[in-house]
Image (cartoon, rainbow, N blue to C red):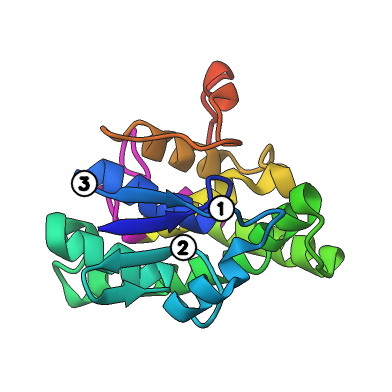
């Protein structure tokens, strides 16, 4: 199974992270996203006409949408990550996967603007991202289970993995997480999972600070 990957892409990191957490073997193919825009070359457009990353290839199966990749890896290697033990759990997982798509277009876009000079309406991206962080903070403040905090219960799902990178990397796009203690506890819960791997920008600085208190 091959992942066409860019090390600084939050979407690519979602796939790498889930694979590491569930023990799914991946062969990495580095793509020069910036500055060469290799993903827009004829070779890559033949593989993925939308010209986006990541791309997951398994035999003759080619996936270009990150949620589909997360579903596929979980189905193959550890289906409990799908969060579908009940209709309620399955619906909640889908709800947060859709929320993660919005984060790509707000916090994710703000980050690309700041680190790669990607064209964006930066004020709108940041304002939307802040509204989404407030929504996430309110949910996580109510969704707490002793020392862990995940989006749909006391165990993580692909929804957590889909949302985590753009939230954790929000400061790269000029949006601070200092005012969101429940979110910071959630990121700690994910970082504490066996098999967790880092990416550039998601560092351990917050782990050297006092554990946030949620009112």
Q: Give whichever of 191, 147 is nearer the camera.
A: 191
Q: Residues within 10 Å of mark 3 (few under 14, many from 20)?
A: some
Stretch of the chain drawn in magenta: 138-158
Q: Which residue is mark 2?
A: 54
Q: CA distance from mark 3 to mark 1?
A: 20 Å
At x 66%, y 48%, the residue is: 170
Q: Residue at the top extreme?
A: 208
Q: Position of residue 107 (x, y in %)?
A: 67, 58
At x 43%, y 58%, the residue is: 4
The numbered mark at residue 9 is 1
At x 46%, y 49%, the residue is: 13
At x 58%, y 62%, the residue is: 135
- Say which element carries label 2: loop
Q: Give whichever of 130, 142 is nearer the camera.
A: 130
Q: Which residue is mark 3?
A: 22
111 relative to 178, above or below: below
**Who comes first in sequence, dot 1 or dot 2?**
1
Q: Give whichever of 74, 127 is nearer the camera.
A: 74
83 relative to 170, above or below: below
- Say which element carries label 1: loop
């Amino acid at each position: 199974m091959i992942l066409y990957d860019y090390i600084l892409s939050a979407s690519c990191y979602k796939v790498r992270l889930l694979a590491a957490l569930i023990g799914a073997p991946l062969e990495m193919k580095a793509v020069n996203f910036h500055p060469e825009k290799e993903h827009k070359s004829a070779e890559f457009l033949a593989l993925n006409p939308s010209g986006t990353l990541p791309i997951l290839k398994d035999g003759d199966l080619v996936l270009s949408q990150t949620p589909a990749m997360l579903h596929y890896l979980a189905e193959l290697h550890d289906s409990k990550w799908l969060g579908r033990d009940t209709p309620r759990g399955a619906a909640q997982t889908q709800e947060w996967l859709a929320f993660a798509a919005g984060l790509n277009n707000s916090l994710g876009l703000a980050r690309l603007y700041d680190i790669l000079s990607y064209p964006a309406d930066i004020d709108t991206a940041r304002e939307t991202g802040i509204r989404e962080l407030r929504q996430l903070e309110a949910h996580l403040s109510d969704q707490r289970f002793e020392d862990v905090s995940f989006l749909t219960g006391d165990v993580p799902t692909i929804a957590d993995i889909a949302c985590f990178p753009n939230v954790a990397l929000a400061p790269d796009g000029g949006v601070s997480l200092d005012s969101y203690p429940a979110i910071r506890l959630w990121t700690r819960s994910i970082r504490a999972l066996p098999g967790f791997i880092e990416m550039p920008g998601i560092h351990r600085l917050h782990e050297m600070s006092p554990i946030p208190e949620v009112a």
